[in-house]
Structure formats: structure tokens, C-alpha cells
Image: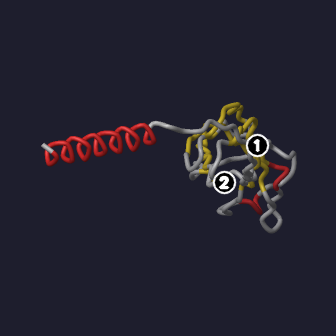
Amino acid sequence: MARHGKKKVMMLGVVVLAIALGTGAYAYFTSTGAGTGSATVGSSSAIQLSGGPVGTLYPDGGDVPVTVTIHNPGGGAEFVNQISGTVANNGGCLGTWFQVDSASYAATLAAGASDTVSTNVRMLDSGSDQDVCQGKSMTINWSSN
């Protein structure tokens, strides 16, 4: 019986140890905390504007349509409002002899996205000889605000 008693005491010890370890697994502390982090805000990127080919222009001729492509190369959305164009001088052919209508886009363009807007170009009658413009390729400089 002494053997049986030792076994019971040993088993009781194992059970008590298991309960103690099991209870310890469920014990914890609560705490609060605080900290700081940082974030960097990006910068706007210049919108890229390019015009498609314009049909043939004549002094005091009609409107000739042109499509302007708007591209946002940046990493964030950009708001584009008015798009306007001016014609550059080419030799004696003056840019002021041309008129480019403004186009209202007034929308936000997503990062990396492109879109188009249409407008018109015309050659004005200067009241003088404009032969110097014949056959010239005129450059339209596009801008937005």
C-alpha cells in the first residue's frame, strides 16, 4: 500500500503542476501605449499636353478642329481646368494671325491617366499679304491652369 500511496501522491503532484502551468498560460497584463510615425506628401507633376494634327488653315477660313491629349504622368490625381493654345511665329508668319479657342476640361485626371478634349483653330485675316504663311507648319503651344 505504500507503493500505492506514493503513486497517488506523485499523480496528485503532476495534476497540481499541470493546473499551475495551465493557469499561468492564461495570466496576462494589460497596458496602453502611444507612438508616432511619419508620412511624406508627394508633389504635383506638370500635366503633359499635346495636340493632334490640324487640317489646312486659310486666311479668314473657317474653324479647324484639333484634339488635345491631356496626360497626367504623376503619382497622384491632378485637377485640370482650362486648356489654351497660342501659335508660335514661324519666320514671317506671325502667331498672332491665328486664334486657338480655349477648351474647358474642368476635371480631375487620375495618376497615369490620359484623356482628350477638342477645340478649334483658325487663321485670321490680317488685312495684309499673308503669303509668307503658305506651306508653313505652325506650332501650337498648349497650356493649362
Left or right, 41 with respect to 27, comes to: right
Left or right, 106 with respect to 118, comes to: right
Protein image colouring: secondary structure
Whole-angstrom CA distance, mark 1 to mark 2, is 13 Å
Residue 35 image offset from top left, x and y in percent? 74, 47
Name the residue tied to disc 1: 84
Q: Depth check: 42 or 117 in front?
A: 42
Mark 1 vs 2: CB contact within 8 A: no
Residue type marked 1: Ser
Classify mark 1: helix, strand or loop. strand
Left or right, 126 with respect to 47, comes to: right
* Quadrant location of the C terminus in the rendered image: top right
Task: Looking at this view, name the residue that lies furthest to the front.
Answer: 1
Name the residue tied to disc 2: 48
Q: Depth check: 108 or 120 in front?
A: 108
Residue type marked 2: Gln
Left or right, 27 with respect to 65, comes to: left
Q: Residue at x 85, y 50 (%)?
A: 96
Q: Depth check: 125 or 94 in front?
A: 94
Q: Residue at x 59, y 47 (%)?
A: 111
